[in-house]
Amino acid sequence: MNTVELDAYIRKIPDFPQKGVLFYDITGILVDPRAFTGCIDAMFGLYQDKGIDAVAAIEARGFLFAAPFAIRMGIPLILIRKKGKLPGKTIAKAYQLEYGKAEIELQPEDIPQGKQVLLMDDLIATGGTLKAAWELITTAGGLVPEIFGVVGLPFLHYDQVLAPIPVRTLLTYQSE
């Protein structure tokens, strides 16, 4: 699926979740099996020969893309969730979002030691959540060779926040 086709499935919602924010809603991809399959196929094509040992995904929409990708790749899926949602031993990291503060956590025993963990989310905006997730993965002993998002909003300068980790997306919007 090319970026022009994919763009047709992204809903642009003005003033959500607050006035002045243009929300890029990926739900249109999920409700169309052809578009969703096209995304997973494109992701697989990008990473099938890259030596990825696991994929870590951000709650909640990141899970939707990472789960079928992990199955297709034959690799583990690691969940990164909001604080208080995972049982057992966890490690946590607080971070700033575009509209407030939050905290995420993961179960450190899920991270393959010294192995390549692709970090994934549905949309990359400011990069704050992904930076916190990257720090959690590396603290737990994993290596993050790249960060992937279905949609990227580089005009919010996520590249500066996530440097030096390379960021790749299927679709990029250059401005609101």
Image: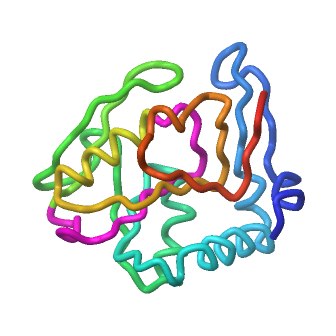
For image coordinates 27% across by 44% down, the residue present is: 135
Name the colour scheme. rainbow
Look at the picture and state if 154 lies above or below 176. below
Q: Which residues are magenta?
A: 109-127
Query: Within the magenta stretch, is there residue 119?
Result: yes
Q: Quadrant of the C terminus?
A: top right
Q: Residue 51's x, y, as percent?
A: 41, 79
The answer to which quarter of the image holds residue 156 is top right
Of all residues, the one furthest to the top in this rendering is 19
- 151 or 51: nearer the viewer: 51
> Horizontally, is 4 left or right of 96 in the view?
right
Q: Quadrant of the N terminus?
A: bottom right
- 94 or 33: nearer the viewer: 94
For image coordinates 40% across by 24% down, the residue present is: 96
> Horizontally, is 97 left or right of 34 in the view?
left
Q: Residue 105's x, y, as percent?
A: 26, 45
For image coordinates 70% across by 61% down, the residue present is: 30
The answer to which quarter of the image holds residue 84 is top left
Look at the picture and state if 167 lies above or below 49. above
Of all residues, the one furthest to the front in this rendering is 164
Query: Within the magenta stretch, is there residue 18?
Result: no
> Horizontally, is 149 left or right of 76 in the view?
right
Look at the picture and state if 9 lies above or below 41. above
For image coordinates 34% across by 52% down, the residue present is: 80
Q: Residue 175's x, y, as percent?
A: 77, 30
